[in-house]
Image (cartoon, rainbow, N blue to C red):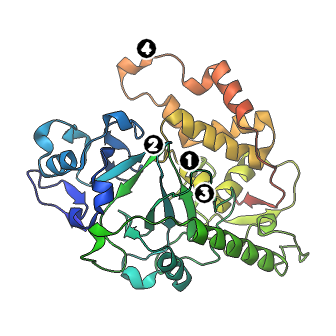
Amino acid sequence: MVDNSGSHGGWGRIWQKESIPTELKNQDQWLIAKMGDNGKPPLYPRSPTATERGLTFGDVIKIMEDPDLGFIHTDRISDTEKVIIGIMIDPDDDYYFIDWDDVRDPSQGDTSVPERVVEWINEIGGYTEVSPSGTGLKTICRNTSETESPPPLAEPGRDNLDQQPIGALTENPTVDVYTGGQYTSITGHVFGGSDSDVESKRLTDARPTLSDIADELQQSLTAESSTVSGNSGQEESTLADIGRESIRRKGYDQDRATVAKSGWIEGDWIETSDPTVDQIIATGCALDKKFRYLWNGNVSRYNSVSEADHALVSRLWYYADDRELVDDVFQQSELYGIRTRRLGISDWSKPDPKWDVDSYKKSTIQSTNDNKGYQGRYLNPKD
């Protein structure tokens, strides 16, 4: 899946262009991005939703085979990063995609994908490929309805597939649906092996199957919540109330208020109506993968850092439910660090970080207070 050919020997490319469906190749909304520790930031166009500046698939082939064409700055690509391609989904497009995250162990291949996930994918049909990291799958779909949108499958604070980490992976599998206003990477690495007829396949509409998946996930959640007890031995009404002890929790460094890439958050789940900053951070990072990504400053799924600010603040409202506490916790995040980091002398002439502009902070906090408050226990991290 990694192609290191071309004029730049250290330029690793992740794609199999022959396997990408013709329907997608015919779009002129392609982009080039890179993949590294900080997500998948676009290289060209720099905005992941600038569809009017999108590339044709022919452009993509030329750039991937000869980066010296000048579309992108190759000095922005390190030896440890891979170059990937993606397609921008306009809000008015019929395209959407299902993101099966952490369902595949690259060392074991497609056989490691849970049987139920395989059944759902087979029921949907159409085109499913392996993600650039090899740990996830993606089903590209086309909505055939003019009035109905694909149903969401995930909620803040929950890993929604009832499945322990796959193989050597450390994250619980999740599934969600994404529509317009963003881009998605494309690899052409077809799930289940090569398919010579994949180019002629039409993208399917997964809405009927998605409705069944949503119902099944809800039934599983309801059934388990009726039998699981919390630390105190008392039965709780939802899984979110207890924050499952079995979850793979990311290592939490209290001194630096950062979240490591591996390990566990050591601590006890406690009942409290007045959580501290550390308890909110630890709980959000333990229970909510998207919280954790945003906390670490990963903004690859968002059109701008401002949009990522709104996404993280929305999640902070869920766990904090207090304006001042939301502000205090946000300022300890790496997302805030992106706003404050100054890398050179010339940067000191810039105005204050955007979050510290009072009008921006107030409007962001006010406009994102749209979550029901978290009702579960909080993780009290050990010193």
Question: Which numbered mark, 3 or 2, is in the foreground of this view?
Answer: 2
Q: Is tag 4's residue or tag 2's residue first in the polypeptide sequence?
A: 2
Would you name the residue on which mark 2 appears? Answer: 90
SS class, disc 4: helix
Residue 137, quarter of the rendered image: bottom left
Q: Is residue 276 above or below residue 127?
A: above
Residue 311 position within the rendered picture, expressed as x and y whole percent measured from the top left: 62, 43
Which residue is at 27% across, 55% downward?
25
Is residue 241 or residue 65 the one in the foreground?
65
SS class, disc 1: helix
Quadrant where the N terminus sits is: bottom left
Residue 320, quarter of the rendered image: top right
In the rendered structure, which amino acid carries the disc numbered 2? Answer: Asp
Would you name the residue on which mark 4 appears? Answer: 349
Residue 194 position within the rendered picture, expressed as x and y whole percent measured from the top left: 27, 78
Q: Is tag 1's residue or tag 4's residue first in the polypeptide sequence?
A: 1
| Left or right, 189 with reference to 374 | left
Q: Is tag 3's residue or tag 4's residue first in the polypeptide sequence?
A: 3
Q: Residues within 10 Å of mark 2 (few under 14, many from 20)?
A: many
Disc 1/disc 2 C-alpha distance (Å): 23 Å
Q: Residues within 10 Å of mark 3 (few under 14, many from 20)?
A: many
Is residue 23 or residue 69 the one in the foreground?
23
In the rendered structure, which amino acid carries the disc numbered 1? Answer: Leu
| Left or right, 185 with reference to 124 | left
Quadrant where the C terminus sits is: bottom right
Q: Residues within 10 Å of mark 1 (few under 14, many from 20)?
A: many
Disc 4/disc 2 C-alpha distance (Å): 36 Å
Q: Is tag 1's residue or tag 3's residue first in the polypeptide sequence?
A: 3
Q: Can you name the residue that lies furthest to the right here?
A: 234
Would you name the residue on which mark 3 appears? Answer: 252
